[in-house]
Image (spheres, grey):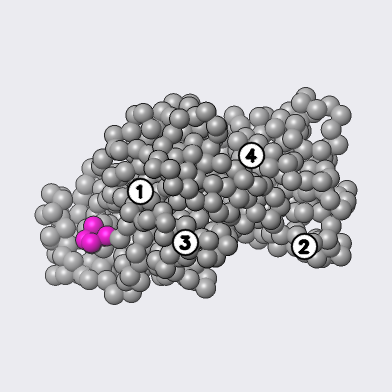
Amino acid sequence: MTDPGYSALRPEHPIARSLTELAEHFGLEATGQFAQDSVTGITLSSKNVLAGDLYVGLPGRNAHGASYAAEAAAQGAVAILTDAEGAGISAGSGLPSIVTESPRALLAEVSAWIYRTRENPPTMLGVTGTNGKTSVTYLLNAILRQLGVVAGFSTTAERGIGALRIPSTLTTPEASEVHSLLAKMREAHVGAVIIEVSAQALTRHRVDGIVFDVVGFTNLTHDHLDDYGDMQTYFEAKRELFTPERAHRGVAIVDSQWGRKIADEAGIPMTTVATHPGIPADWQVTLDEESAEHTAFTVSAPDGATLSTSVPILGRYMAENAALAIVMLVEAGYDLADIDRVLTRDGGITAYIPGRAERVSGDRGPRVYIDYGHSPDAFTTTLESLRRTASGRVIMVFGADGDRDTSKREEMASIAATLSDVLVITDYNPRFEDPAAIRRVLVDSARRTRPDLELYEVPNPWDAFRQALSVAREGDVILHAGPGHENYHEVAGKKIPYSARDDARSALTEHGWL
């Protein structure tokens, strides 16, 4: 069941708390008259204020959030949490104020206090890394469901509580939304919660107020350098999750230098997983079979116990993700034999991961996959898996998103040219950048890498996929990388409705292949 409403993130039966006690608890300056036991929620958006909310006014790029205090008051806000500047701006709104030097830094702790999310929390699992976070989260959720555990999760694609699904807008929601979601999950009596934790979530305080039972690390590859400048700084942002203030235990895939570095430098007990022979680790993963329909693998525990299973998604990297999920559950206290029993019973991990190497084609014509990957490593791992399982050519459709890390674009195009037989370069969320300039960087890099490559430049993604399909034959594979689960194409501040999944299916139907 999908619920498009913002209110679905909120607990249905919040317990009111005292704003006076809140100010006293955090040692904050308060002005105005507070109603007794009046605060039941917290939000950053004046448009999403519900009666009883504490509205948080943050300084912004274009305006101070306190400028919308009157709108928040009209919606039912009972007070504003802001800085000294914001208190002055909001003085005429009629809202009493609670003032702190940095409301963003305090947002999570206040949210946790209002929603009481530190009281008897469920098992908390967190996943970080450049690629694979969403997949590991869905795999954890699937295995828990197979074990009979009601779980809640938050990913780049969506948030879920049992059968309920809510589209996501950020990889990790703002702290106020995280804690309201946790409160709603508590009402649903979840036994475990899985949260996809981005580097930005850590540096921007979105998961403050949470102590995870187990956290997992997938990998660290070239991405987000527009935010962090270099790989070491990016790594340090991720490493923060592996500290006693954030988590009790950690699990890391140590195939790469960054995984080994996390394991070595973590401030918490760590368990290691290796997926390549010769790399020392506590757990070893062996790839048993890789096909278009599934990926089979075996995990070997430190005590010699083994578990052999499969995931219904193409790619060696999916075996790595699934192995990480299994080890995280063991570290969280679930028995490996119980996991083995339910996976054997069900014929493997029964997971659906939206927009991650998601096959959208039928039994006839080319195999077509939609994938959210938009980094060099994501291109490499997916294309290599497709090449190993394809009987024909590999055709790739991709673009580079605007107003994001520009330093990875040439490498992405070079990898695409190296591992594909046909390239169709198109626009992918150019935002406020010149889309033609983005495409030119990609085309030039691909041409330098393989001057003789069959390459098409088609700006419109609708037309781009149809160009790929027009040259495809039976046995070929088409990968549309970038959009994944997204349902829009963003140009100059406008989100134009577009689903690569739906568009691909429509085009396949037009060609009589679906």
Q: Earlier in the sequence, mark 3 or mark 4?
A: 3
Q: Is residue 41 magenta?
A: no
Start-end of magenta stretch: 117-121
**Type of amino acid under label 4:** Thr
Q: Earlier in the sequence, mark 3 or mark 1?
A: 1
How far apart, in angstroms, are the residues tagged by discs 3 and 1? 18 Å
How far apart, in angstroms, are the residues tagged by discs 3 and 2? 32 Å
Which residue is labeled 2 in the image? 362
Q: Quadrant of residue 115?
A: bottom left
Q: Quadrant of residue 98?
A: bottom left
Q: Give residue 482's position: percent from left, percent from top.
A: 65, 47
Residues at circles 2 and 1 in contact by the CB criterion of under 8 Å: no
Q: Which mark is residue 331?
A: 1
Using a 10 Å C-alpha cutoff, classify the residue at mark 2 as few (fewer than 14 neighbours), some (14 to 19) or many (20 or more): some
Q: Give the vertical position of 340 relative to 433 (above or below).
A: below
Give 21 or 322, whichever is nearer the viewer.
Answer: 322
Residues at circles 3 and 2 in contact by the CB criterion of under 8 Å: no
**Type of amino acid under label 3:** Arg
Q: Which mark is residue 341?
A: 3
Is 479 left or right of 354, judged from the image as shown? right
Numbered disc in front, either 2 or 1: 1
Using a 10 Å C-alpha cutoff, classify the residue at mark 4 as few (fewer than 14 neighbours), some (14 to 19) or many (20 or more): some
